[in-house]
Amino acid sequence: MAAASVAGQAMNVFPFRDARAAPDPVLEAGPVAHGPQPVPLVLDNGSFQARAGWACPGPDPGPEPRLQFRSVCARGRGGARGGAGPQVGNALGSLEPLRWMLRSPFDRNVPVNLELQELLLDYSFQHLGVSSQGCVDHPIVLTEAVCNPLYSRQMMSELLFECYGIPKVAYGIDSLFSFYHNTPKNLISSGLIISSGYQCTHILPILEGRLDAKNCKRINLGGSQAAGYLQRLLQLKYPGHLAAITLSRMEEILHEHSYIAEDYVEELQKWRCPDYYENNVHKMQLPFSSKLLGSTLTSEEKQERRQQQLRRLQELNARRREEKLQLDQERLDRLLYVQELLEDGQMDQFHKALIELNMDSPEELQSYIQKLSAAVEQAKQKMLQAEVSLEVDVVDSKPETPDLEQLEPSLEEVESINDFEPLFSDETPEAEKPVTTVQPVFNLAAYHQLFVGTERIRAPEIIFQPSLIGEEQAGIAETLQYILDRYPKDVQELLVQNVFLTGGNMMYPGMKGRIEKELLEMRPFQSSFQVQLASNPVLDAWYGARGWALDHLDDEDVWITRKDYEEKGGGYLKEHCASNVYVPIRLPKQASRSEAQASSKGGAGEQA
């Protein structure tokens, strides 16, 4: 029974991988990217991870995207002064040592810092092997946020056309590209897309293949907030390991050890059972050192360590004395040189030097020379004494051999000892045994374990119950019900027949079952619905964008050219099946001067 429990405990222990990203190699575009027509570049510009690759035509486009890296940058301390320049994505390695330096171009899921966005694009183009001189001579398919602000798209278009000189660009929504990839071609379908990413969760109704932007809703919660919530939970639970409970490790727990409860309250009741807890708790092993400082050091080693520290202090003091002596000697030489000027009769130079030394008279100079000479001589004597004492310490450190003749007791001492024998017991004393102190067994490995129990379901639950972290927002179920209520019954029935789940935050085990349970509760009795999870919730957006680029490569009605950019501005958008709805800014017409004068005269007449 004990062996079985030990085996079960070992099965539930999971070490942190603490994965460190490897720097991306600089790839070559290859002959495929240089055909008769420029091959499009596909960039999935996500707030958590960026993915970039080529949309190569042919039956086998290859295992792409070629680049996947975190959408963060860190500037070195040196910057333009010769230090390390900005580092991007996988070039950063481990993120935790640089967490305080990390910068992202995104506010939520909208790029707002174009200087950092330019660093991400430079990194992508360089490592993809774009070899065109002075420009990027390839069409670009770029993902953007749902209902992206015109100002953000304007800055992005300005960056792409003015800085990189691209021929044309097409913008699309990542979740719609994923929907496009998982829908059979030439099928105009309707449905509801539930997309949850690093910063936001969106519910997007699709009617006859186009986005109904008026009824889109966003929940400002995603994987980032779940990781922060999990970090606070475990730091409150284990205050002794605050520094070890990092955001990177919390993201690892979310990705590999968390799941969505189909019924949250019922699942919490299960966790109250000790057997269920013991079988399902995940013990995350923190790194630790099995050697305790000071516990394995003998007295000789401690003495040796003290002597090393003493020698180190002596060397440090000697170095400081030498530096001070050198400075004093240089000052003394300077003063003696000025005194020689006085003795040689060079009065002009002497008075000038005296002013530089901030002295008033030759007597003051002589007094400084005497004091400084005495200080230099005293410092030399101290250094000699320190060297002598150090040599004496080294010589005297050998143990002296005692005189054996002096240790032999005399006859009188033996007799005096015999007089005291009756005071002691007749029993022969036993040899002294070393006292063995029983030290408590302290399991270091168990101390450095994080027991992740109900936290496995509490952290991802926030997208269904934002009130868990104090957010006054509706969860996925309430928002889904709100959107469906805005449509007639027949349209509701059409939408729920194709509920599509995509995004990295939808990859929790049990997510599909939870959505089905929520729909079952809100839909009428005996009504039908269908929930579909993307084949690859993380990469399907990029695959869909690549497929869309190949299908519409010669369709000029969906690409924004440089001519369109120059004529209609950076906020212009050509709509397509995976794009946002273009809503141009319409400024109110300014009234002419005659109309303004007429209206002002009419107002004056009415007042009269």
Image (tube, grey):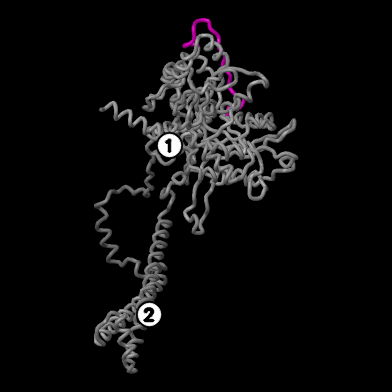
Residue 2, position as x, y percentages in the image: 49, 26
Image-based side of 246 in relation to 182, left or right: left
Circle 1/circle 2 CB separation < 8 Å: no
Mark 2 element type: helix
Q: Give the amino acid type for the residue marked by disc 1 in the picture.
A: Tyr
Mark 1 element type: helix
Q: Which residues are magenta?
A: 520-537
Image-based side of 226 in relation to 414, left or right: right
- In percent of the image, x 29 and y 30: which residue is there? 604
- In percent of the image, x 49 and y 22: which residue is there? 214
Residue 193, quarter of the rendered image: top right
Residue 63, quarter of the rendered image: top right
Identify which residue, 331 or 467, lies in the foreground. Answer: 467
Q: Nearer the viewer, mark 1 or mark 2?
A: 2
Q: Mark 1 or mark 2, which has the lower sequence index?
A: 2
Residue 296, disc: none
Q: What crowding class fits label 2: few (fewer than 14 Cα within 10 Å), some (14-19), or many (20 or more)?
A: few
Q: Is residue 353 above or below residue 308?
A: below
Residue 127, position as x, y percentages in the image: 63, 45
Residue 349 on the magenta span: no
Identify which residue, 596 or 120, lies in the foreground. Answer: 596
Image-based side of 166 in relation to 319, left or right: right
Residue 525 on the magenta span: yes
Name of the residue lying farthest toward the top: 526
- In percent of the image, x 27 and y 55: which residue is there? 421
Whether residue 343 can be seen here? yes
Q: Is residue 79 above or below residue 53?
A: below
Q: Is residue 405 above or below residue 5?
A: below
Q: What crowding class fits label 1: few (fewer than 14 Cα within 10 Å), some (14-19), or many (20 or more)?
A: few
Residue designated by label 2: 330
Residue designated by label 1: 447
